[in-house]
Every structure is written in structure tokens, then in C-alpha cells.
Image (cartoon, helix red, strand yellow):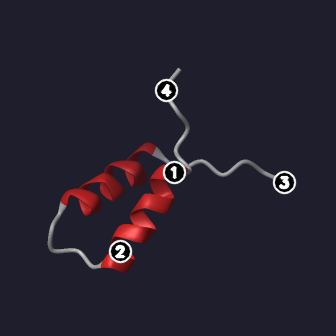
Amino acid sequence: MAKKITSKDVASKASKVLRDGRTSKDSKSCAGSALSQREKKK
């Protein structure tokens, strides 16, 4: 199975969604999922 990694651009946008208090619970859940697939810095 291929390893899924979120791009830097998408991770940045997901981070903004999580920090914004106006976004819905579903949006935050989706953003969190995207960030969890981001490769860790070495």
C-alpha cells in the first residue's frame, strides 16, 4: 500500500482551518486528518 503524505501547501491551509474559531467541527476533523498524514520533520 502506498504511503499517503499531505503536501506542505495543504498542511499549511489545514493548520489555518484548525486555528480559525469560525470553522465547523467537520472542517476541523478533515484538517486534522490531513495534518496527521504529514511527514514528520527529521
Q: Which residue is mark 2?
A: 27
Q: CA distance from mark 3 to mark 1?
A: 17 Å
Quarter-of-image position of residue 31: bottom left
Pointer 1 or 2: first along the chain = 2
Residue drawn where x is 35% and y is 58% of the image: 14
Element type at mark 3: loop
Mark 3 or 1, closer to the camera:
1
Q: Amino acid at mark 3?
A: Met
Residue drawn where x is 35% and y is 74% of the image: 27
Q: Amino acid at mark 2?
A: Ser
Q: CA distance from mark 1 to mark 2?
A: 14 Å
Q: Which residue is mark 4?
A: 41
6 or 18: which is nearer to us? 18
Q: Residues within 10 Å of mark 4 (few under 14, many from 20)?
A: few
Q: What is the quadrant of the N terminus in the image?
A: bottom right
Pointer 2 or 4: first along the chain = 2
Q: For this view, does 26 lie left or right of residue 4?
A: left
Q: Which residue is mark 1?
A: 36
For residue 31, above or below residue 9: below
Element type at mark 2: helix
Q: Amino acid at mark 1?
A: Ser
| Residue 11 in the image, given as x and y percentages of width and height | 40, 50
Q: Which residue is mark 3?
A: 1
Q: CA distance from mark 2 to mark 4?
A: 25 Å
Pointer 2 or 3: first along the chain = 3
